[in-house]
Image (cartoon, rainbow, N blue to C red):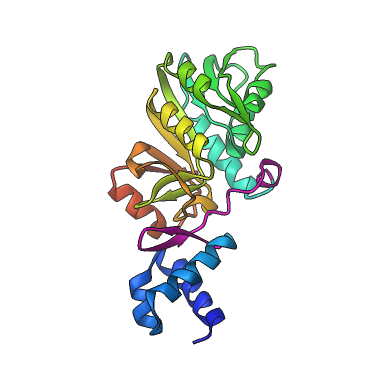
């Protein structure tokens, strides 16, 4: 079998099964595991899969620059954002992550809703500047330009003083075994720190993020209590998440 044929077969198996194992591919192709690992390395370098110990998972497409991500799945993200807003009660302290779905979430807060929004996203804070009844707490730190959020030790220290009711987390990957992942090491650390400061963590997950993984792990799937997905999401993608004890809400 030619290299190109093996690679196509690997990608087809990923799309069908959600993961591949190097040992099984080696036996199926009749080649060494070294050859399979080389195929996986090359596919990973093209951004077509995410290598993990023993094999690979589908790569998340939600790692593009912020401006480009704003154009991806925009209507689906808007529905997810509306469903998230329905979870917010007056008087709560709510942490809102950076990201394109979070930007849509704050746009849809009712004009009369009185809450405190804590965020490490300057974009989210500015979007709420004219909202009369929302108090905004902006966490400072080093600006991570890819996602337009603050990261670093100063941000983590500031978060330690917060006790929030809800945390709306943005991720690039949601996978039942790989867990919650993102594309930057420091951002993963910040998201873990924010989840530790909230009574409930809610992951906003458009289709591109489900059954996919990125290089840096935020935590196990159980780090989230709730995941909001599109209404038409295949149950084959959501059933393993629910079996882990996480609530699925459809938008």
Q: Residue 115, percent across and down?
A: 52, 16
Q: Which residues are magenta?
A: 48-70
In the foreground, 6 or 164? 6
Answer above or below: position of 167 versus 236: above
Q: Residue 138, percent across and down?
A: 58, 18
Q: Residue 218, percent across and down?
A: 42, 39
Horizontal side, residue 178 vs residue 138: left or right? left
Residue that sits furthest to the front in the current view:
34
User: Residue at left 49%, top 16%?
Assistant: 158
Q: Is residue 217 magenta?
A: no
Q: Residue 86, percent across and down?
A: 49, 30
User: Residue at left 43%, top 25%?
Assistant: 166
Residue that sits furthest to the bottom in the current view:
1
User: Residue at left 34%, top 43%?
Assistant: 220
In the foreground, 192 or 176? 192
Q: Is residue 53 magenta?
A: yes
Answer above or below: position of 12 versus 66: below
In the foreground, 22 or 245? 22
Horizontal side, residue 56 vs residue 155: left or right? left
Locate residue 145: give its quadrant. Answer: top right
Report the label total.
Answer: 0
């Amino acid at each position: 079998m030619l290299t190109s044929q093996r690679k196509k077969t690997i990608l087809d198996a990923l799309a069908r099964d959600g993961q591949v194992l190097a040992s099984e591919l080696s036996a199926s192709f009749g080649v060494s595991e070294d050859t399979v690992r080389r195929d996986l390395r090359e596919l990973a370098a093209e951004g077509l899969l995410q290598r993990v110990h023993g094999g690979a998972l589908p790569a998340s497409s939600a790692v593009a620059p912020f401006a480009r991500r704003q154009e991806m799945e925009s209507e689906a993200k808007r529905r997810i954002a509306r469903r998230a807003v329905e979870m917010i009660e007056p008087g709560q302290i709510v942490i809102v992550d950076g990201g394109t779905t979070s930007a849509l979430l704050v746009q849809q807060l009712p004009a009369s809703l009185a809450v405190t929004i804590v965020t490490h996203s300057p974009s989210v804070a500015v979007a709420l500047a004219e909202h009369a009844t929302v108090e905004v707490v902006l966490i400072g730190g080093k600006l991570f330009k890819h996602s337009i959020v603050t990261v670093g030790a100063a941000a983590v220290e500031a978060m330690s003083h917060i006790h929030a009711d809800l945390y709306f987390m943005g991720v690039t990957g949601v996978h039942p075994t790989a867990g919650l992942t993102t594309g930057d090491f420091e951002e993963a650390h910040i998201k873990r720190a924010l989840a530790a400061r909230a009574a409930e963590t809610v992951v906003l997950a458009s289709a591109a993020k489900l059954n996919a993984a990125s290089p840096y792990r935020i935590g196990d799937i159980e780090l989230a209590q709730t995941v909001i997905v599109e209404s038409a999401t295949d149950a084959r993608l959501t059933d393993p998440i629910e079996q882990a004890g996480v609530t699925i809400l459809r938008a």
